[in-house]
Structures are given as C-alpha cells and as structure tokens.
Image (cartoon, rainbow, N blue to C red):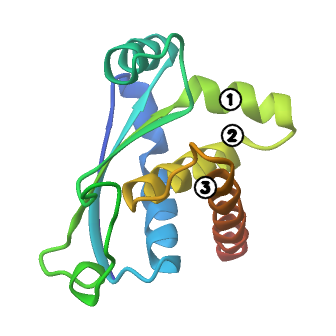
Amino acid sequence: MKFLIDLSALKKTDSRFFSQFRKCAGTILGILSFESAAMSVILVRDKKMAALNQKLMKHKGTTDVLSFSYLEKKGKVKLTRSVLAANPPAFLGEIIICLDTAKRNAKEYGTSFEYECALYLCHGILHCLGHEDKTRRGFNEMQRKQKKILKQVIRSKD
C-alpha cells in the first residue's frame, strides 16, 4: 500500500503528533480498500480553527474537523478500481483537525486524545469520499461507518 499523507501544523510543537496521524490515516485508508491515496492533514488550535470555520463555512466558533474533497463531483464520489489503486495516488482532499477540541472532548466524553484524533481523521476522510451528515439518514450512516472503522483501527494498535 502506498499512502502519501502530507502533514502540517501551525505550531511546531504539534509536529510530535505526525507519526500518530500518518499511521492512523494509513490504517483507515487500508480498511476502506485503498491501495494508494494521498491527502493533506493540517493540525491547528482553537483560534485558527474558529477563523477557518468562520471564513470557509460561515459558522461562528471552533469545530473539531473541516474537510474538503478533491474527488467529489456534485456530492458524489465514484470509488472505482482506478481511484482505489491509482498510480500516482489519487489526492482525496484536505482535512483540518483542531487539537484543542480533541483534548476537550476526550475529557468530556471519557475517551483518549488519540481516539478523538482518530475519530476526526476518520470523519474527515469519509467526507472526502462523499459521505454527508447533514440529514438524519446521512448522519446515522456516517456514525455507523465511523464506529466500524474505529473498532478496526483500535484493534490494529493491539
């Protein structure tokens, strides 16, 4: 499997999380049957995420994850063999993750920081693949898919 995960962080100290995100992204993409893929993951803090959320989504305040698909056409992504095993790898999109929100939510929900980050990464990847959570049906479907993937991600760490 060939995965190109471009990671960047606005705070240099946040680069310590790069290996965690790279490994997790590779695991998620493998579970989703990708043989090759490329994506960009940007780690930010509350202040930057709130600014991006306002500018890009017109929503006030911070959020956990923003994602922008490069595959989506009119809300649909067709995952053909040529996309799943593309050479060079297909660029799925950009995912922006707020580390402060992950830390807060881990405490609030009794999970770990690592779990919250994996959840946001999985959520962002699913959005890049055309999944939506704006409708009740879409939300429920996305939740089921995330839970299934995250169980496998956690199992792969053991």
Distance from disc 2 to disc 3, alpha carbons, whole Å, reads 26 Å
Of pointers 2 and 3, the one earlier in the residue sequence: 2
The location of residue 109, given as percent across then percent down, is 84, 36
Left or right position of 33 against 5: right
Question: In the current view of this chain or complex, which residue is farthest to the left?
Answer: 88
Q: In the image, which disc is placed on residue 103?
A: 1
Q: Is residue 154 above or below residue 108?
A: below
Residue occupying image coordinates x 62% and y 58%: 142
Question: Could you tell me residue 4's position as x and y percent?
Answer: 26, 64
Identify the amino acid type marked 2: Phe
Instruction: Give the camera-side residue of 8 and 95.
Output: 95
Whichever of labels 2 and 1 marks the residue nearer the N terminus, that label is: 1
Q: Quadrant of residue 10?
A: top left
- Give yes or no for contact between labels 2 and 1 (Cβ–Cβ under 8 Å): yes
As drawn, the label of residue 113 is: 2
Q: Local crowd at mark 1 within 10 Å, few (<14), some, or many (≥20)? A: some
Q: Judging from the image, what secondary structure is the residue with disc 1 in?
A: helix
- Left or right placement of residue 119 versus residue 13 in this view: right
**Residue carrying label 3:** 138
- Which amino acid, mark 1? Lys
How many labels, in total?
3
Q: Is residue 66 above or below residue 46?
A: below
Mark 3 secondary-structure assignment: helix
For image coordinates 44% across by 20% down, the residue present is 49
Alpha carbons under labels 1 and 3: distance apart: 26 Å
In-front residue for pair 148/144: 144
User: Which label is found at residue 63?
Assistant: none
The front one of 147 and 22 is 147
The amino acid at mark 3 is Gly
Number of the front mark, 1 or 3: 3
